[in-house]
Amino acid sequence: MKISKLQISLKEKILVDINFSISSSLALVGQSGSGKSLTLKALLGMLPSSMESIIESDAAFELKGGRDISFVPQNPFTALSPLTKIKKQFFVDDGRIKELFSQVDLDESLLERFAPELSGGQLQRVVIAMALEREPKLILLDEPTTALDPKTRVLILDLLRDLQKEHGFKMLFVTHDMNSAKVICDEICVIKDGRVVESSDMKTLLASPQQKYTKTLIDANFANRDFRR
Ligand SMILES: Nc1ncnc2c1ncn2[C@@H]1O[C@H](COP(=O)(O)OP(=O)(O)OP(=O)(O)O)[C@@H](O)[C@H]1O
């Protein structure tokens, strides 16, 4: 799937102007302010009304908030209602919910609980189950593991990778963390100030980054010793 143009502007100012391809799982990596959130919002059709976006792609399904796109947010602790039982927060029947729970390795008994009664890892599995509800063709992930402890982070990344193998959806994984990106993504697009700095398959870029900016992101990766694999 090729997005040949994704441009976001605010009045006369072009904030983001990028292009990328996703054959299976693409990491969109950049430091704070590089345009990651705006890119996700444009694809979800959730940009502020003051902004305009142009998306040109060869996708066989609707972008800009289409029904084949799902979203996994950064913080599972705020993604669910605390006052409604987990099972009531799904929009599918009980049989399908149980199927989804089994796909994300969650015990069915958790369906009767409320969100504050679950751990961060369990909550993120619930959120991922919700993202799978409509059998999406593309899942957008916004730093889905940064709110989790390092051990749980690895388990959730492994789960996402396994689910993708099984279900075949494409993933666009937005992060500033190369460590997470390299676990589940085969391809990477590095952005800075709303423009593409470099893009290639993950192994090539990690072995020989062409740009200083990319090297800095990779070095930040090695500073984070908690999360070596
Ligand atoms: N509502 C807004 N109005 C004006 N400018 C905005 C708005 N939202 C974002 N921007 C600008 O657009 C650029 C990209 O912002 P964006 O939030 O997409 O970055 P990001 O890569 O997601 O950063 P972070 O990792 O900190 O979330 C920044 O220069 C930001 O200041």
Image (cartoon, grey):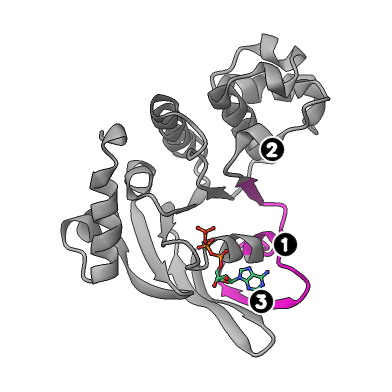
Query: SS for tag 3?
Result: strand
Looking at the image, tell me whether mark 3 or mark 1 is earlier in sequence order: 1
User: Which of 75/40 is in front?
Assistant: 75
Disc 3 designates what residue? 53
Choose mark 1 or mark 2, whichever is in front: 2
User: Which of 158/214 is in front?
Assistant: 214
Looking at the image, tell me whether mark 1 or mark 2 is earlier in sequence order: 1
Residue 127, quarter of picture? top right
Please provide the residue range marked out in magenta: 43-71
Position of 108 relative to 215 (above/below): above
Q: Residue at x 63, y 63 (%)?
A: 43
Queried whether the magenta region covers residue 182, the answer comes back as no
- For the C terminus, give its image quadrant: top left
Queried whether the magenta region covers residue 49, the answer comes back as yes
Residue 99 pos. (x, y %): 65, 22
Quadrant position of ligand 1: bottom right
Whether label 2 lies within 8 Å of ligand 1 gets the answer no
Residue 165 pos. (x, y %): 43, 37
Choose mark 2 or mark 3, whichever is in front: 2
Disc 1 designates what residue? 46
Disc 2 designates what residue? 79
Mark 1 belongs to which amino acid? Met
Residue 54, quarter of picture? bottom right
Mark 3 belongs to which amino acid? Ser
How far apart marks 3 and 1 lie (CA) works out to 10 Å
Residue 218 pos. (x, y %): 26, 55
